[in-house]
Image (spheres, rainbow, N blue to C red):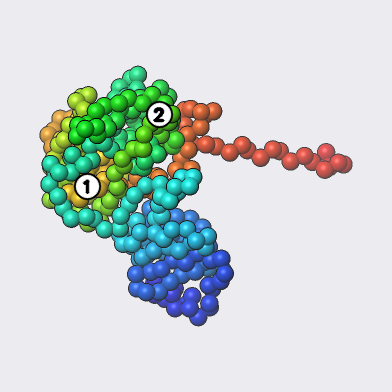
Amino acid sequence: MLRTWMLLLAVCGVAGAGADTIYLKDQASVSGRILAEKRDQVAVDVGYTVLVIPRSHIARIARSGGGPLAKEGGPDAGLEAVGEGTAAEFYSAPSRAAAPRSVRELVNELGEAVVQVRTPSGQGSGFLINKEGFLITNFHVIEGETQITVEVYHLQDGQLEPRRYKQVRIVAMNKFDDLALLRIEDADAPPFRPVALGSTDALAVGDRVFAIGSPLGLERTVTEGILSTKTRQMQGKLYLQTTAQINPGNSGGPLFNLSGQVVGVTNMKISFGEGLGFAIPVEAVRYFLDHRDAYAYSSENPSSGYRYLEPPSRLRKPPGNE
């Protein structure tokens, strides 16, 4: 069906100046105006109709404004790293995984990027995604809270030293996917060391993964296990299931592959069993970050993670039509 669309597009010649271009894995391309992007598909207006193209068919996307090209491969191909201000990328998402390494090596390397998130009612974990202090955690870790403290471990003289930051702003949150984006805004904060976001495409059941977090307040705890399944359905959503131990306090922390890339965000476990932990797939995190404006937190509406537009004013009736 998709090849038929491509042939039709070639005959009709819909490409034009200022159009977005979607390059497909079969060497074909589609030019038009992108109307909407979802996690698994992209809708593009080609002039006479709207095509819905599966992400799995997309190699990359070239924006008419000259923006960065999307990462290649996988069902999330076509997602772009979105800039914040003058930053080139908001987060790092390499198109290929690095060579596998030992957990011992990776823990020492990733230690500065995994943080502890504290609120008056509890605590959880999180991880930094860029040098400017933006970090990911679970929505339920900061739900109903605005007073947030983040503890970061900075490498000094070969040792990781904790430092607490109290100027933490909620940037965006999505309670349905249990994700929140925070930013450390302390004036004297140094550049932070982030982690890279990976992909679950290259993961297979049985692959080794590991989590870093603060279960029960025990900061920088490392647990290792395997990926039990990539598609565990719970409450209408798909989760990664792992044998890596997940406990209260791990929530919001990263689940890593052996390349040191985040493949999931740990958020729950089955309390009456062992080795039954779950993590939000990293594709959901990337979608949340790419569309963070839609989930922006507003202090004027603190009960929701969404910013609602004002309704249009009622139109006045023309004179004589009362």
Percent position of residue 137, x then y:
33, 35
Q: Quadrant of residue 192?
A: top left
Report which residue position mark 2 lands on. 188
**Residue 260 badge:** 1
Q: Is residue 250 visible?
A: no
In terms of depth relative to the viewer, which is nearer, 247 or 274?
247
Query: How many angstroms separate mark 2 from mark 1 (CA)?
Result: 28 Å
Label 1: how many residues lie within 10 Å, few (<14), some (14-19) or many (20+)?
A: many
Q: Quadrant of residue 211?
A: top left
Task: Tell me which label, 2 or 1, sits earlier in the chain.
Answer: 2
* Residue at (44% x, 78% y) in the render: 7
Q: Quadrant of the N terminus?
A: bottom left
In terms of depth relative to the viewer, which is nearer, 299 or 167?
167
Percent position of residue 73, x then y:
31, 62
* Residue at (34% x, 42% y) in the render: 129
Q: Amino acid at mark 2?
A: Asp
Percent position of residue 146, x then y:
42, 24
In terms of depth relative to the viewer, which is nearer, 258 or 229?
258
Q: Amino acid at mark 1?
A: Gly
For this view, does 170 lie left or right of residue 243? right
Q: Is residue 295 visible?
A: yes
Mark 1 residue element:
loop
For this view, does 268 lie left or right of residue 171? left
* Residue at (21% x, 42% y) in the render: 109
Instruction: Say above or below: 200 vs 265.
Output: below
Q: How many marks?
A: 2
**Residue closest to the far bottom:** 11
Q: Quadrant of the C terminus?
A: top right
Percent position of residue 37, x then y:
44, 55
In terms of depth relative to the viewer, which is nearer, 74 or 91?
91
* Residue at (34% x, 30% y) in the render: 140
Label 2: how many residues lie within 10 Å, few (<14), some (14-19) or many (20+)?
A: few
